[in-house]
Amino acid sequence: MSSPRFEGKTVVVTGAGSGIGRATALRLADEGATVIATDIAPAGLESLVVEATTDRVITVVGDVSESDTIAAIIAAADGTLHGVANVAGIMDGFLPAGEIDDATWDRVMRINVTGPVRLIREALPLLIANGGGSIVNVASEAALRGSAAGVAYTASKHAIVGVTKNTAYMYGPQGVRANAVAPGQVATNIEARPASELGASRVFPLLGALALPVAEASKLAAAITWLLSDDSLNVNGAILPSDGGWSVV
């Protein structure tokens, strides 16, 4: 696919070294965007640049929840920014409230919530100065129900829905849209091994009974890039399930 839909636009993609973030970065680059791709894994970003076969992919290595990484992302934008895709995220081992440890809770909330909020905060002045833009956060089916993950991941994705809706309301009049995509099961390398017998016994049988398809990352990239594009100009504050029908069960 080759289209000028993002020609002349600069978009940040977090978690761009693999999975949904990588697929999103590649699609944006293919459609003409300058992509500021960030990830904690240098090798993933290096291979992304090779696969993209364009000089419009700028990489920033670092933890997106850290202020130094966010400063580097904003510096790479060089005053021009039209979109942000907050894709980076981690799971929680399906640990329920009675088993969650402080370290897991803090890490999940830091990467899944604090990082996106910090990036949004620093990106907003650039988006507004450039006449507006689009923010897309990756939520999850765990943002819509309590039966898809552990307590930390579930809480973090519910929080991202709140961040999305509040940002949409506060900055819509200034031309900034904020929406979220809620994936179901996706073929990525995100760590999803259970660390809780209770968590696994409650979640996995339900997933098995639903027999939902596991989506390729490119299908999520299609939804994310639509929300980033002017094709969705009338959409603000929406939570878009992209889950093979899970949300209607």
Image (cartoon, grey):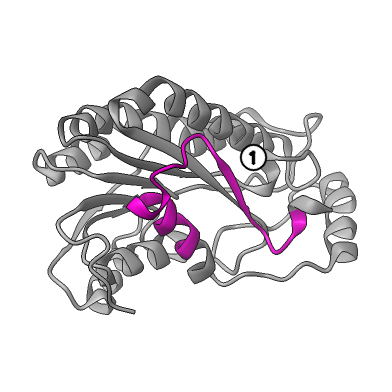
Q: Residue furthest left?
A: 78
The magenta segment is: 221-246
Q: Which residue is mark 1?
A: 153
67, 121: nearer the viewer: 121
| Mark 1 crowd level (few <14, some 14–19, many ≥20, 10 Å Cα) | many
Residue at image x 73%, y 46%? 149
Q: Amino acid at mark 1?
A: Tyr
Residue lying farthest to the front in this orientation: 234
Identify the element where label 1 is drawn: helix
The x, y position of residue 119, in whole percent, is 32, 34
Figure disc tally: 1
Q: Quadrant of residue 49?
A: bottom left
The picture places residue 153, in percent across and down from the top left corner, at: 64, 40
Residue 85 left/right relative to 181? left
Residue 74 in sight: yes
- Measured as percent of width and height from the top left, residue 190 is found at 56, 59
Q: Is residue 230 magenta?
A: yes
- Is 222 a magenta residue? yes
Q: Note whether 175 is above or below 92 in the view shown.
A: above
Q: Considering the image in quadrants, where does the N terminus appear?
A: bottom left
Q: Residue at x 89, y 52 (%)?
A: 201
Above-or-below relation of 240 to 151? below
Q: Is residue 167 left or right of residue 127?
A: right
- Give coordinates of residue 58: x percent, y percent: 17, 58
